[in-house]
Image (cartoon, rainbow, N blue to C red):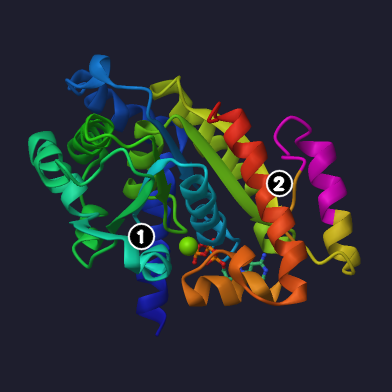
Amino acid sequence: MFSLWRKARRENSAASRLLGSTSLRFALHGWQRGKCRDENTRSEMKTMVAANQKGGVGKTATLVHLAFDALERGLRVGVVDLDTQANASWTLKEFASGYTASQMFDQSSDEVRAWFNGEVTDEPCIRLVESDAKLANMETKKLAEVGATFRSNIAALADSGFDMILIDTAPSLGVGLAAALIAADFVLSPIELETYSIQGIQKMVTAIANVRQANPKLQFLGMVPSKVDARNPRHGRHLQELEAAYPQLMIPERVGLRSSIADALASGVPVWKIRKTAARKAAKEVRALANYVFNKMEIA
Ligand SMILES: Nc1ncnc2c1ncn2[C@@H]1O[C@H](COP(=O)(O)OP(=O)(O)OP(=O)(O)O)[C@@H](O)[C@H]1O
Ligand SMILES: [Mg+2]
């Protein structure tokens, strides 16, 4: 029991060091020297990452709903699930492309293009690059080794016709998150208004700022309070504190604590397809958030 706890602590601190300033810059230095060849040929595809090293704060719920909303806007959306928990993969399983997340780190851009050749037509679609067990190996590799391949393969998805890529990440400051952030144009951080979640926010903001030194095009869309209980005074207090501490980083939308969202995730549909009166409020909030995010990303 104790050795397990010590092991988890060791792994965690190694991952945190990676996204801490010195080690991250060092790791990215190696990556920058081997810049991917597709960089200048990238189309207008936009890539967004949902990131927060705290678990259970609504990353997957938000990302999946952005994917459903984008589909209804007529976009061709790729969802890459970099979390071995595979929650997004479960909810979006009907959209599985057969391509797996670990292949995004192991295969060449030509292999990615070959796989998706003809898969993406003019029709709006969601194609899921699903989480697989091999993804766990990637956390043992160096960012300098896998970061360039992942970024290059995200660019290959642009060549395959996707308008947007949404990347779901695991709740840890690890190689997967760093690779996603150096490949992305935008990052969005759902947060929970609970004490433990608030305590980790500065670390997350610092990690994103550090990555921006290596990927200056990365824009932090901000933090969106999720699972907000309007009747809970602690939530109200934490929201005020956050708005005072991070006035530029707080997104002016929020998603309430609503069981219809959990129902939707469990049923593989967006919350606006849940036939309950209570789902209407949730749908309105999620749609407003999607509007905000897609406006900022300049997506029609
Ligand atoms: N607005 C909401 N209201 C109620 N429940 C929610 C809401 N958003 C998400 N949930 C539920 O809370 C749990 C955590 O949400 P979610 O999986 O989206 O968080 P996460 O940040 O992706 O977690 P992890 O870090 O473990 O991947 C899930 O069971 C989900 O169904
Ligand atoms: Mg998740």
Which residue corresponds to the image point at 59% horizontal and 68% vertical from the top-left? 273
Name the spot of residue 35 as percent of width and height, x first: 21, 21
| Residue 19 placement: quadrant | top left
Which sits earlier in the primary sequence, circle 2 or circle 1?
1
Q: Is residue 45 above or below residue 69?
A: above
Crowding at dot 1, Cα within 10 Å, few <14 / some 14-19 / many 20+, comes out as: some
**Magenta residues (range):** 238-252
Which residue is at a point 20% across and 59% down the rendered structure image?
137
**Residue 11 marker:** 1
Q: Position of residue 56 (x, y in %)?
A: 57, 66
Name the amino acid type tagged 1: Glu
Residue pointed to by mark 2: 288
The one of 74 and 172 positioned closer to us in this rendering: 74
Residue 193, how many percent across, how many down?
A: 74, 59
Label 2 or label 1, whichever lies nearer to me, is: 2
Tell me if 136 is positioned left or right of 81 in this view: left
Please name whichever residue, 117 or 62, is drawn nearer the observer in this view of the structure.
Answer: 117
